[in-house]
Amino acid sequence: MNVYVDDPARTGESRLSDGRLLGWAEWGPPDGVPVLCCPGAATSRRLGFGAGVVEALGVRLVSVDRPGLGVSTPAPGRTFSDFAGDIRQLGALRGLGRPAMVGNSQGAPFALACAAAGVTSALAVVSGADEVAAPEFASALAADLRGLVERTARDPEGAEEFFAGFSAEAMWDMVMAGSPECDLAVYEDPDFAVAYRRALADGFAQGSAGYARDTVLAMRRWPFALDEITVPVDIWYGELDTSHSPDNGASLATRMPGARHRVVPGIGGALLWTHAEPVLKSLLSRAAAARWTARSRAHRDGRHVP
């Protein structure tokens, strides 16, 4: 029997310099290689991935509640840059350094913002919410999604109010209605369904404002330069994923130097849970290679890199 998720080994909150709390959950050995997860839309820190895999690979997986979700203090009007600053502080407070990161679904642009800010050493975008407001997608979007994108660009405050009308139950129904059978086999697995629905309930525990802010940020043009991201990036999509990117990340991959694009047959948006091992193995390998390259250059230049 497949085991897609398990309960966190450790949970807690860290206090940032402005007094806000940032909630986190961890799996794997506490002295393992740090990998930070930006979870999907409206889900809390408690929905991890790679049950058994993180332990076998020696990974310390850390999932974080974005502000207003789970137990993290709301931050009205927050930006992508603000989130990258939060993660920089969390890295220092929790001894993570510049961790490798995984950005899933709506968490992907937040992870990309961290990469652009130099907060992470390597990144895996898995079933990532693409930049649907990019001009090249204007004619590729379904009419309802195109309408939301245009509304968000025209009236972001009004769009944020609209998205604030969503609930945990509405999110569950939307995901179930839009998923192929291969994904439903994961989502409707009894243990996974319990964990997923609990994470959604946690995500909306403080209300819907956190999810609404996330969605407006993700649906507008992204303010960071993808072509200036220099850390290694893996971009993973399931072949049957019709929810996250109009072209399964093909154009997204071309916008970052050295990004690797992988499309996995036979699965859709549930890819993070069905293919956790190859995702993590590739991420760890690319992060290690980047560290070796940086140390080699530093040695050649007479500098020290930890």
Image: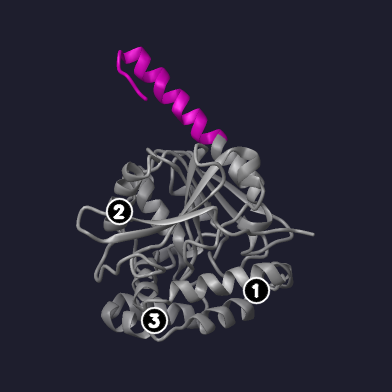
Question: Image height check: is 147 above or below 131?
Answer: below
Viewed as shown, does residue 157 lie left or right of 61? left
- Name the spot of residue 217 as percent of width and height, x first: 34, 67
Q: Residue at 44% x, 71% y: name it.
A: 138
Residue 12, which numbered label? none
Do we see residue 62 in this rendering?
Answer: yes
Given residues 300 and 221, the one toward you in this image is 300
Picture quarter containing residue 131? Answer: bottom left
Along the line of sight, the residue nearer the viewer: 105 or 248 = 105
Mark 2 or 1, closer to the camera: 2
Which of marks 1 and 3 precedes in the sequence? Answer: 3
Crowdedness near tag 2: few (<14), some (14–19) or many (≥20) residues, C-alpha within 10 Å: many
Mark 3 crowd level (few <14, some 14–19, many ≥20, 10 Å Cα) = some
Residue named by callout 2 = 86
Name the spot of residue 248 as percent of width and height, x first: 57, 60
Residue at the image point whose x is 35% and y is 23% from the top: 305
What residue is disc 1 on?
A: 179
Label 2 or label 1, whichever comes before in sequence order: 2
Q: Earlier in the sequence, mark 3 or mark 2?
A: 2
What amino acid does circle 1 point to? Ser
Q: Would residue 266 be found to the left or right of residue 94 on screen?
A: right
Q: Locate the C terminus by quadrant.
A: top left
Q: Callout 1: helix, strand or loop?
A: loop
- For the magenta stretch, what is the residue range? 285-306
Q: Which residue is mark 3?
A: 163
Could you tell me how far apart the alpha carbons at marks 3 and 1 are, in whole angstroms? 21 Å
Q: Name the residue type under label 2.
A: Asp
Residue name at image x 32 percent, y 84 percent: 161
